Image (cartoon, grey):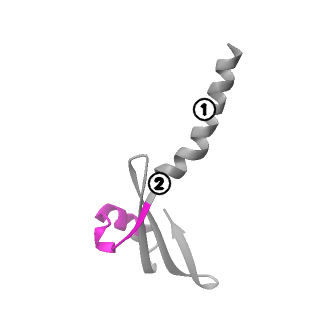
Amino acid sequence: MRTKRVTFIHGYWAAALFIPVLSAHAERIELDQVPKAVMDGLRQEHPDAKELKVNNETHFGLTLYDFKFKESGPHGQESKTTR
């Protein structure tokens, strides 16, 4: 019984360490490829965002959009990333 438990723990840690790395795929996409609802949410949260760049990532079948942009803040122009 104890052997099965140790094997399970080792299998769990192997999956936790390697599956997230193997399941991610990212690519740069154009802004016109981003769904309208996603762009509307970004514009609502960051209305002054400039120089937008976006990566499309797939994790376990879910699509994520990783935005990089510049925005004016209290300390001048700042680069930000949001997901």
Residue at the location (42% across, 71% down)?
54
Which residue type does callout 2 highlight? Ala
Which picture quadrant has residue 11? top right
Q: Position of residue 27 (x, y in %)?
A: 40, 66
Magenta span covers which residues? 26-42
Residue beneath disc 2: 24
**Mark 2 falls on what kind of element?**
loop
Quarter where residue 25 is shown: bottom left
Residue 53 lies, in percent from the top left, at 43, 75
Q: Nearer the viewer, mark 2 or mark 1?
A: 1
66 in the magenta segment:
no
Q: Report whether 13 appears left or right of 20.
A: right
Label pair 2/1, CB-CB below 8 angstroms: no
Q: Does dot 1 land on a helix, a strand or a loop?
A: helix
Q: Is residue 20 left or right of residue 10?
A: left
Q: Is residue 13 left or right of residue 19?
A: right
> Badge 2, how many Cα within 10 Å: few under 14, some, many 20+?
few
Q: CA distance from mark 2 to mark 1?
A: 20 Å
Q: Position of residue 22 (x, y in %)?
A: 50, 50
Q: Residue at x 35, y 66 (%)?
A: 40
Can you tell which mark lies on residue 32?
none
Mark 2 vs mark 1: which is more N-terminal? 1
Q: At 69% across and 24% down in the image, what residue appears?
A: 6
Q: Is residue 45 above or below residue 24?
A: below
Q: Is residue 29 one of those drawn in magenta?
A: yes
Q: Is residue 58 above or below residue 54?
A: above
At x 33%, y 73%, the residue is: 31
Please tell me whether residue 2 is drawn above or below residue 65 in the rendered image: above
Placement of the N terminus among the 4 image quadrants: top right
Local crowd at mark 1 within 10 Å, few (<14), some, or many (≥20)?
few
Q: Is residue 1 left or right of residue 43?
A: right
Pointer 1 residue: 11
